[in-house]
Amino acid sequence: MKNNIIHDEWKIIEEGFNPENNRISESIFSIGNGKMGQRANFEEQYSDDSLQGTYIAGIYYPDKTRVGWWKNGYPEYVAKIINSANWIGIDIQIAGETLDLAKTKIEKFRRVLDMKTGVLSRNFVATMPGGQKVEVKSTRFVSIDDSEIGAIRYSVKALNFSGEITVTPYLDGDVKNEDANYDEKFWTEISKEIKAEEGYLTLETLKTRFQVTTGMWFSVLKNTNKVDGKPENAIREKYIGASQKIQVEKGDELTVEKLTATVSSLNHPKKQLVLQAKKAVKRAATAGFDKLFANHKNCWLKKWETSDIKIEGDIAAQQGIRYNIFQLNQTYTGEDERLNIGPKGFTGEKYGGVTYWDTEAYCLPFFMSTAPLEVAKNLLLYRHKHLSKAIENAKKLGFNCQAALYPMVTINGEECHNEWEITFEEIHRNGAIAYAIYNYINNTGDKEYLAPHGFEVLLAISRFWSQRVNWSAEKQKYVMLGVTGPNEYENNINNNFHTSYMAVWTLKYTLEVIDFLKKEFPFLFEELIKKWKFNEISETTVWKEIIENMYFPFDDENQVFLQQDGFKDKKLIPAAELPVKERPINQKWSWDRILRSCYIKQADTLQSIFWFEDDFSDDQIKRHFDFYEPLTVHESSLSPCVHSILAAKIGYEKKSYEMYLRTARLDLDNYNNDTDDGLHITSMGGTWMAFVMGFGGVRVKNNRLVFNPFLPKKWKAYSFRINFRDAHLEVKMERNGFTVVNHSNQKTSIQVWNKQADIEGNKHVKFKNSK
Amino acid sequence: MKNNIIHDEWKIIEEGFNPENNRISESIFSIGNGKMGQRANFEEQYSDDSLQGTYIAGIYYPDKTRVGWWKNGYPEYVAKIINSANWIGIDIQIAGETLDLAKTKIEKFRRVLDMKTGVLSRNFVATMPGGQKVEVKSTRFVSIDDSEIGAIRYSVKALNFSGEITVTPYLDGDVKNEDANYDEKFWTEISKEIKAEEGYLTLETLKTRFQVTTGMWFSVLKNTNKVDGKPENAIREKYIGASQKIQVEKGDELTVEKLTATVSSLNHPKKQLVLQAKKAVKRAATAGFDKLFANHKNCWLKKWETSDIKIEGDIAAQQGIRYNIFQLNQTYTGEDERLNIGPKGFTGEKYGGVTYWDTEAYCLPFFMSTAPLEVAKNLLLYRHKHLSKAIENAKKLGFNCQAALYPMVTINGEECHNEWEITFEEIHRNGAIAYAIYNYINNTGDKEYLAPHGFEVLLAISRFWSQRVNWSAEKQKYVMLGVTGPNEYENNINNNFHTSYMAVWTLKYTLEVIDFLKKEFPFLFEELIKKWKFNEISETTVWKEIIENMYFPFDDENQVFLQQDGFKDKKLIPAAELPVKERPINQKWSWDRILRSCYIKQADTLQSIFWFEDDFSDDQIKRHFDFYEPLTVHESSLSPCVHSILAAKIGYEKKSYEMYLRTARLDLDNYNNDTDDGLHITSMGGTWMAFVMGFGGVRVKNNRLVFNPFLPKKWKAYSFRINFRDAHLEVKMERNGFTVVNHSNQKTSIQVWNKQADIEGNKHVKFKNSK
């Protein structure tokens, strides 16, 4: 454990100020509302190490690509959700000296993130170089009720002196990204204004020309009385602030309330931005901090009502799982199909806030099961909206007939990744996007999504697969050459089992979908045939050919499918035998050594076995797990969840729990020593999956929820919530049994440990633990 | 043909000024002396497109690496031979207006590079915007006799006016590299001084802290009389110049003689640099332009005496082959084992002037056969000097026991390349470096080179190979996983035939060398055993195991070794069937498409068959050539020469000639549309090889020179010179026979078309054409 987070069921608590851990804590205590978010930077000045970060969903800059040697097909730019105007800033001066935690003695430092209500607070006592002691309390939230609003209550109490305190709330747009490829700043100023109690700063991104107006309203109270007095305005390039000097007596407390608005051209006409910001600021100021907070809190309570997981008997585990759920919920709220989930959410710059296949593979299940239908659907629509760009992308790589290759990373549908072995070759992502359509429909029952959205995406992906394979005269089979699987510790390999399996599965599913459309939406299907110039007979004939004749490498000795051609030429030494000082190999070994080793970064063959478990017998699954798990180093945070679920499936409960633990508190305990960069948001979806699908054994089979739960030994009980179509269930697993409560009015049919039952609305059923 | 070079046996001639081709001509007309060199930039101002380039061998800057995503093991920097102070500059003003070829009307422009004497000249008539016509003549050379000296004679004749002409010879160190990764300048100024007739500018490179003093001496003549008058000094940051205003009458001609010195801390103590520059300038000024030129010319004539190739009946071919020889000779003179041959020599920034395996594979044969022994030997010593760095490099990648991996590109022995598929995986380069030792000894007979230099390098490389292979339980053979062969259109492949062949060959050769040392240098060998902690028995036992049990992919159907595992899974479509508009695929296809295609960038399997032709029957060679040649797109300039030689070997004379033509005038005709970047210097060594080993059929077998010549149909005759040990031969191939003249006193034994003969010193032998 590298960070000292105090265990608590609902709160993330840090006590004592530790500057070396500051970046880690800035990540951990991040807050957001799906539309914007920020790292837990300080309101007051801080001159020591810090990563300033305020991010607005959808506001990106196309940073010029940086490569060693250019390869044909690389994108010209890398889109990044960029650091935007800092609106939390409140400078404090005591007798002319700036309060700066790097330059004062700090005591009683305590930082708390209350996950139940989504609020970040911080207290400390600082002794200024001049000896003045102040007690500071700050409370802040990014409203999840009114997503353009942020609110801060910040107080300074004079503990041992009388004198002058200057407070300067400000907005500062002169920010930059640490990961800028060429050290550029991405914002220019459009306008600014500052008046008695409010100020507005409008900035524009270079190139993409997004505009964002940040507004603030502020007031200062001495004890409980509003301080009157004309603030002195401070105006600089991309900066506005308002300073107020206030005389205090020992014991007096000054409180700054700063309510902010962030409005962008993503949602408003540029010309109206300042006006809209003013409206939002007025809305906030009229309501006031307390009312805004009450609304915000209610929203959070509602979210918890459908998504909470409770663990009895293990506070660390309870805190861990809630933290994952909390971060997922504050990263994506699913109201806008133009937005998605960056691997770090709003908590850091790494991976640029852009979309990976992580969304479909690891996050979709959480939102499908805990949020209204539209939330998951919007994640799918995001890809549908990008279909034409995915077709363009495939064309650039030499494909035709409107085949689509979805990008590895993207923000607007264009590819933004530039390592050839990933950009061009990690094409299994196309399969994950197809699978998400199936998964969504299987979970939600929303078959209409296929007509036309789902179908259009599936057709274009199937066209890609059918062109991407080639006939091997040598093998008398179709082969898929030059790919990178989910295990990125193998590059440019041939016949990666997972990729080939996804390809064949996509073709099969698309054929099923065609049958469905022909039956259920015949007129629409006719239109789609024309729109997409779909030659059903000739195209599907080829697909069937491929389905019948695809090559999958197989090992007779172990009776397992091989991850790729030639895998058995490697020395197969269990990862457990690697010296500790050589791990993670990612940091200790050169890339070539990793590549020619047998070590697997993340579930690869096991990924498709997880997704298509019904295609494999339990024995087969066990054989594959036994073969691959010992070789897997799980150096991607997206890996253990899949292993955890499969282990549960084959009865390896201890292994399942061990794998779960590797991600459950990944960031809280800074397990991978990289939380300073930001949180592993998409991995948190995997943790949720490991819990619900692993421990809970939840599946959807034949339009029915199926449970195969077990209770980890260390725990007394756990319970979780789950949506299934129109029903909303709460399940509780205890040592002696499993209870399902139907919190909705909708009767639903379930299966628990092979027993089937119907549950009427608002009733519950109890199952005895048969294990 | 994209450049209009006039055909001439000894001269490269361009007539008419074509600004769009300026960069191409700047490359083509480059001059150098092995220690420094420069592009054919203009002396006078030129404000249109140009790549200013003056390079000093060994003077480099470690530019910070630029990558997309960092991989463990990448080098921190990329060393680059950098653009250094421009010493050719002479500004001309006519009545206050600057002469600038971009801003004046140009007539009678003619540029000539006389390869026989190594001199670049240029004439033109310019009409100034004010109507004044001047005739300009410039002559310039970089002395190959006194390698610190450069000389320019530059004259301006007033054709139609009387008035004022200002001449300003200058030195300008405020230069930059276009390929700087982060747009930095690499030089800082240390000192400068300028006096009546001379000036000195000392600059230092950042980080590497090389110092270079550039000095100039200049005088101005009006017609034949020296102009007296005090020049006005112009001094700026990193710049010194001296302006002289001279009144001329119509018909007067001003001539500036500018003699320069370039001395560096590579060869002199830093404190003495200015002094040394002054000495050199004095040396030059005392001799004067004409005497300097006479010495320079004599040196060139001597070089031609041992390296010229004559072709009768084809002026374009004659010009082409001489151009290749000329450029090789002005890039490397072999007096300093710290220097080497950059792929672009001194003619451009691309590839940073650093060393690749090109040197060993394509350049060494030329120098071995046409220059004194030391020249080739210094190329080998360069690698020996870098042995400890190569060991460090391998250690960084996880190898031990002083195994060595020579870098892909280097200047001081450290790796400077950062594409993982090449940096870490294109390890056949290690084999090329081992082969060069064998090749050198086979050609020169200098077996003593093995004790200890050759042996030390071979031992360390053998240790690398023995660790780089692994035992495949599956194949019951040793395999070599994760490599990139010379064909860089395949990355991270398994069991590349060429790499594995080089590995096994190195092990075998090292065993031979050990036997030789034990017999001939037993005491030294004992010392080497200790120095290198060489456990002969255990290490060589492993080597023999590998030699016996190495796996080489083989195709039963075609009875050929396969370039790599799985090659036959590809669609094998002859390159001839590729649409013209899709070529070069390198520019037209995305990288993944190239990778999964069957197309071969450069000789790969054929490279080892070329090097080890005695290991293969003629039938085998034919089968391999017939299999691979149709799939080879020759998109590396290093490819056709190997095919040309093999084609000649198996009697495909037409193919051999066709392949030869692809490189013979590569730059003169800007065949690949990239001569603007600089010349393909190392490929020129390949062209020489194609001529001598292909057309001439030259080999060294059993300590004897063997010839199997043929005469391309288009030609009447050709002749070339070749050193062999102490003999120096001139051979001439005519339609009816082949004549060998021994120009040395040393009797030597040769074989021509299977007939053996001894040739006494200074005698000749004629062989009838048996074909």
Image (tube, coloured by chain):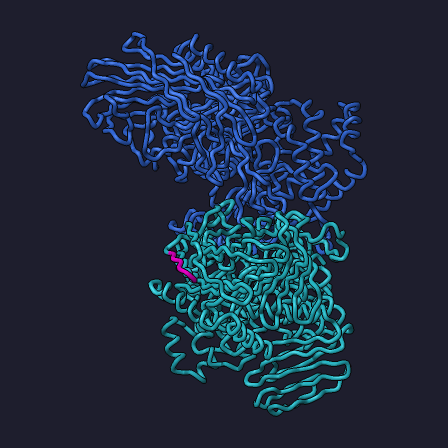
Chain colours: A cyan, B blue
Front residue of this view, candidates A163 and A668: A163
Q: Position of residue A389 (x, y in %)?
A: 42, 63
Q: Does A85 appear in magenta?
A: no
Q: Position of residue A658 (x, y in %)?
A: 73, 66
Q: Is residue A427 left or right of residue B53?
A: right
Front residue of this view, candidates B622 and B302: B302
> Compared with residue A443, is residue B254 higher up or lower down, i.e. above or below?
above
Choose top left, top right, bottom left or bottom right for residue A529. bottom left
Front residue of this view, candidates A640 and A313: A313
Which residue is at a point 77% across and 80% down the rendered structure image? A735
Which residue is at a point 31% across and 14% down the rendered structure image? B255
Which residue is at a point 43% across and 18% down the rendered structure image? B150
> Compared with residue A6, is residue B347 higher up or lower down, i.e. above or below?
above
> Compared with residue B83, is residue A519 higher up or lower down, i.e. above or below?
below
Front residue of this view, candidates A761 and B86: A761
Q: Quadrant of the C terminus of chain A?
A: bottom right
First to last magenta residue range: A192-197
Q: Quadrant of the N terminus of chain A?
A: bottom right
Residue A132 seen from this side: yes
Choose top left, top right, bottom left or bottom right for residue A577. bottom right
Q: Is residue B509 left or right of residue B48?
A: right
Q: Does A193 appear in magenta?
A: yes
Residue A73 seen from this side: no
Count of numbered tags: 0
Choose top left, top right, bottom left or bottom right for residue B78. top right
Which residue is at a point 47% across and 73% down the rendered structure image? A287
Q: Position of residue A533 (x, y in %)?
A: 38, 71
Q: Position of residue B5 (x, y in %)?
A: 34, 30
> Compared with residue A382, is residue B106 higher up or lower down, i.e. above or below?
above
